[in-house]
Image (cartoon, grey):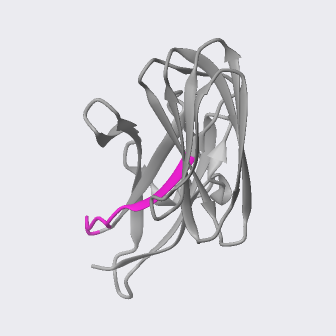
Amino acid sequence: MLFRSTDFNVNDGVDHTSQRQVTLNITATDEIGGSGVLSLLYVEYEYNQSIGDWVPVQMSDWLPYSSANVDYPWALLPSAGLHYLQAWVADGSGNISAPFSRFISYQPDSISIATGQVHVYRKILASGDGLTVRLTILDGGTVDLYVWKPDATLVEVHEGVTSFQEITVNADQDGVYQIEVEGQTSAEYKLEF
């Protein structure tokens, strides 16, 4: 059984949002002579820091493919940071695809972080792209700000941020750049790309 996905995206392919409400889109086809794509399932994952693993946090029912594959409304859980979304498709014979995955970083206007908590965000850059990361402390507290390259090389770190910090990245490699905010103490902050 072979399923092909020509596209799966969240919010038309953006990698970050300040709104919980997003849309999911998938285009999948069954193998030639197959029974056709009949249904699909969406699952949202978040990283659980206490167990050190990604866990499913909400999922849809199996939905009719014909009515749920375009601009399907999805409300991300309200926790700030990286969310992975996966889609599975099934054909009329009950065969189920491997998952198709995408991520989106949720960055509301005000984010609470606890002492010792880490929030992870990701941004896709091509070599030569620029990225400016702005961190503003809104209500007391102290945080550390890290930016990592796709090969896990540290780009820059600022420890003990208590008001405002900005990091500018000039991408020298294609891939996913990771931004981490770690709470030295409880704080409210805003993160902008």
Q: Quadrant of the N terminus?
A: bottom left
Seen in the image, is 176 located left or right of residue 42?
A: right
- Residue 60 image offset from top left, x and y in percent: 41, 42
Name the one closer to the observer, 127 or 88. Answer: 127
- Residue 53 image offset from top left, x and y in percent: 29, 42
Q: Can you name the residue that lies furthest to the top here? A: 140
Residue stretch rendered in magenta on the structure: 93-104
Query: Residue 106 appears in which quarter of the rendering?
Result: top right
Residue 68 is inside the magenta segment: no
Q: Quadrant of the C terminus?
A: top right
Which residue does the image show at 66% across and 30% down from the upper left?
108
Seen in the image, is 39 located left or right of residue 176?
A: left
Q: Can you name the residue that lies furthest to the bottom here? A: 32
Name the one closer to the observer, 35 or 155. Answer: 155
Query: Residue 162 appears in which quarter of the rendering?
Result: top right
Residue 102 is inside the magenta segment: yes
Work out whether 35 lies above or below 144.
below
Work out whether 98 lies above or below 50.
below
Which residue does the image show at 72% across and 71% down from the upper left?
128
Work out whether 98 lies above or below 121.
below
